[in-house]
Image (tube, grey):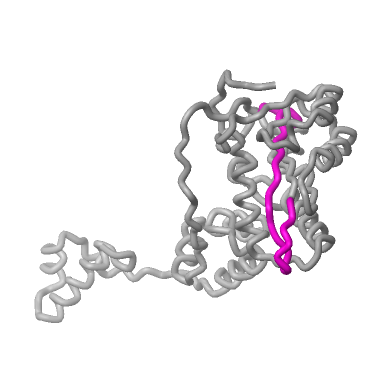
């Protein structure tokens, strides 16, 4: 059966064909095992014109939002609509998001070395690469709180260094307090002696993932994938200063507005506020297997 047909539809067509050939409706319904009231039923679909326009408006600014996030967005604006209807309308009007193929990674060994249980428990940090219109590469340093999913800071530059990392962490330590753990890979920017001294003085322990095991830093790997898909691949940057301004604007929107399925479709700011207010009985973050293979 294809996507445009159904058993009931096929039976109705068979009944219609049989009655045109002179068979009574009662007999035709009996032959295909369908009640006559079902055969006579005419579905009454609501007019989807306004809903289609609303979905298109959402996807104008958020083109990578699929059914679940579009449905959430509609609910935030006060529009009551069933998620199945949203799914049908998006499918029928070719508004579904085309999935990008991801490179498969063979996972071996342990998973994440520590699990964040509260805000400021575990931060994760890493660099991401992009390029200006002229082809010059830029390095983007991202820092996240693994529990709240807050995008704490972003630093855009032409190079990656321990000085850049320290310059991003110091204001956060002063404003939010230092985390208990900082997760990163084993890049030279993160194992530098000066950074180690700063972390020890702040009471933060390093958690380095095993070389060649990026899935041990899965939170920021997933974040980088979403950032590229939803923002970087859609934007072009002429200068370094423009890149900094626009990515910072996106960071603020991300924290305030972007719903996360792992946070019951709350934004990171909403989730953090609910946690502080005691509205959450337990973490909504999916549990992650821990391992004894922790490094300090």
Compared with 195, 50 (above or below) is below
Between 183 and 211, the residue placed more toward the observer is 211
Give the percent coordinates (x, y) of residue 198.
85, 28
Between 36 and 74, the residue placed more toward the observer is 74
Question: Quadrant location of residue 118?
Answer: top right
Compared with 104, 166 (above or below) is above
Compared with 212, 128 (above or below) is below
Question: Quadrant location of residue 49?
Answer: bottom right
Compared with 291, 194 (above or below) is below
Which quadrant, please, contains the C terminus? top right
Residue at horizontal 49 percent and vertical 66 percent from the top: 90
Task: Answer yes or no: is residue 170 visible.
Answer: yes
**Could you tell whether 285 is left or right of 122 in the image?**
left
**Could you tell whether 92 is left or right of 125 in the image?**
left
Give the percent coordinates (x, y) of residue 121.
73, 27
Span colored in magenta:
116-139
Membership of 136 in magenta stretch: yes
Give the percent coordinates (x, y) of residue 220.
64, 41
Between 201 and 265, the residue placed more toward the observer is 201
Task: Answer yes or no: is residue 269 visible.
Answer: no
Membership of 114 in magenta stretch: no
Residue at horizontal 84 percent and vertical 30 percent from the top: 194
């Amino acid at each position: 059966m294809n996507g445009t047909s159904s058993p009931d539809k096929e039976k109705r067509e068979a009944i219609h064909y049989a009655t045109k050939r002179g068979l009574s409706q009662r007999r035709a319904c009996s032959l295909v095992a369908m009640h006559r009231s079902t055969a006579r039923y005419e579905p009454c679909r609501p007019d989807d014109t306004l809903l289609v326009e609303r979905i298109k408006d959402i996807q104008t600014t958020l083109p990578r939002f699929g059914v679940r996030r579009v449905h959430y967005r509609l609910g935030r604006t006060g529009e009551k609509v069933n998620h199945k209807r949203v799914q049908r309308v998006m499918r029928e009007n070719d508004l579904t998001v085309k999935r990008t193929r991801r490179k498969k990674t063979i996972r071996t060994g342990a998973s994440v070395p520590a699990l964040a249980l509260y805000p400021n428990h575990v931060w994760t940090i890493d660099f991401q690469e992009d390029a200006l219109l002229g082809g010059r590469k830029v390095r983007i340093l991202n820092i996240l709180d693994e529990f709240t999913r807050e995008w704490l800071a972003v630093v855009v530059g032409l190079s990656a260094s321990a000085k850049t990392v320290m310059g991003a962490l110091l204001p956060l330590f002063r404003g939010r307090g230092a985390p208990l753990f900082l997760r990163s890979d084993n890049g030279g920017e993160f194992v530098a002696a000066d950074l180690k001294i700063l972390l020890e003085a702040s009471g933060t322990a390093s958690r380095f993932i095993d070389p060649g095991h990026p899935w041990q830093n899965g939170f920021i790997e997933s974040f980088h994938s979403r950032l590229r898909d939803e923002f970087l691949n859609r934007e072009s940057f002429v200068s370094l200063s423009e890149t900094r301004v626009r990515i910072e604007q996106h960071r603020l929107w991300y924290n305030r507005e972007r719903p996360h399925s792992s946070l019951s479709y709350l934004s990171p700011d909403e989730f953090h506020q609910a946690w502080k207010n005691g509205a959450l009985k337990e973490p909504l973050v999916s549990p992650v297997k821990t391992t004894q293979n922790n490094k300090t």
